[in-house]
Amino acid sequence: MKKSIVLGITGSIAAYKAAELTSMLVKKGYEVYVIMTQAATKFVTPLTLQTLSQHPVYVEMFDSPQSWEIGHISLAQRADVVLVAPATANFIAKLAAGLADDLLSATLLATRAPVIIAPAMNVGMYENPIFQKSMQFLKEQGYFFVEPDEGRLACGTTGKGRLAELDKIVSALEEIFSAKHELSGKHVLVTAGPTREPIDPVRFLSNYSSGKMGYAIAQEARERGARVTLVSGPCHLEPPAGVDLIPVETAQEMFDAVIKHFDTADVVIKAAAVADFRPRQRAAEKIKKDEAVMTLELERTPDILQHLGDNKRDQVLVGFAAETENIVENARAKLKRKNLDLLVANDLTEEGAGFGVDTNVATLFFPDGTTVKLPKMTKRELARAIIDQVIKLLTTKKRMV
């Protein structure tokens, strides 16, 4: 049976791209039902979308019904996914406020299907804190976002706000259809990447972490139906669609962001490579190389994982350990010391493990003494194995309640 997609089109100049998007979805075998706002009809005609979708296009809330069905209710129930592309700042604000003053907004409020939103707007509107607050609120309610690309915009400026590439939007939609939803209703908090501890305005202490492992875990958790918050140190990766990204720089900033979201999290997976030390004093000006030798005094950074282990309630807590010697002893000691439910240990001396590569070699350690040694696999495959174990741990905790 064909999957049904309700495609909402709002009044953005990018509305013309909805014609190609409709054509792509129909060619892939989906049933596409189009709802246009009045403003959208100023950019592309309903007849164009009707021809491409091979279904009537819906615009008015109070059009004479073509059958006994109530328009927004029947469309909401028919949808396997609702996709709004492009979505204007105005429409997103209305949705965040719970308004239902046109057919599209009423349909979104009535549907129980997953909703994907692909914003398109001027960079100033996108960066406006009021809009960001609306988008953040909707993410917290479980709406998926395919965030806009950077580039030249219709207004002539350059920045973030251009409708995401259509392939990226279709990919996000197909991930929802292919996903298992074992984590539906769960909040997963993931950390990724390195931290940077400033020495002076131009230098910092850091490590080789690329963030690939944490980002893969975040994507896998999202595809399994979770609401995902990704706290990421500096890296050059595209955040997975539908994930709430919180960028940070220092260990202290990561600590603050994690603690802020810890109480609402069901699962915390600490994949970040957090710096253990930072300079005791940060120089206000660039340090000149006047001396042949410079001594840098260091102090400990906050131990995020230890704090979580000491203060967790019924959350599943997963930690990582990158080791070069005494892997088993060090992993078991850390598992117990940090009060973890699962520890993922990497032997950095093994080929295909470590920072910056697309593969990993890991052993999973559990509090009951069980270990699972995994073969070399891609980081995405390892992310899948970790989330599989997390789901089992959640089930076990639920039985114990």
Image (tube, rainbow, N blue to C red):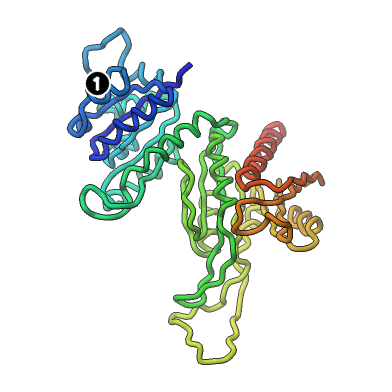
Q: Relative to 355, does residue 78 appear above or below in the rendering?
A: above
Q: Position of residue 242 (x, y in %)?
A: 46, 41
Q: Position of residue 397 (x, y in %)?
A: 69, 36
Q: Residue furthest left?
A: 42
Q: Relative to 386, does residue 247 appear above or below in the rendering?
A: below
| 292 horizontally vs 352: left or right | left
Q: Is residue 129 visible?
A: no
Q: Which picture quadrant has residue 79?
A: top left
Q: Residue furthest top?
A: 68
> What is the count of numbered marks?
1
Q: Position of residue 183 (x, y in %)?
A: 58, 34
Amino acid type assigned to the residue bearing label 1 in the image: Met
Assign the C terminus to one quadrant of the image. Answer: top right
Residue carrying label 1: 61
| 82 horizontally vs 282: left or right | left
Q: Residue at x 80, y 61 (%)?
A: 326
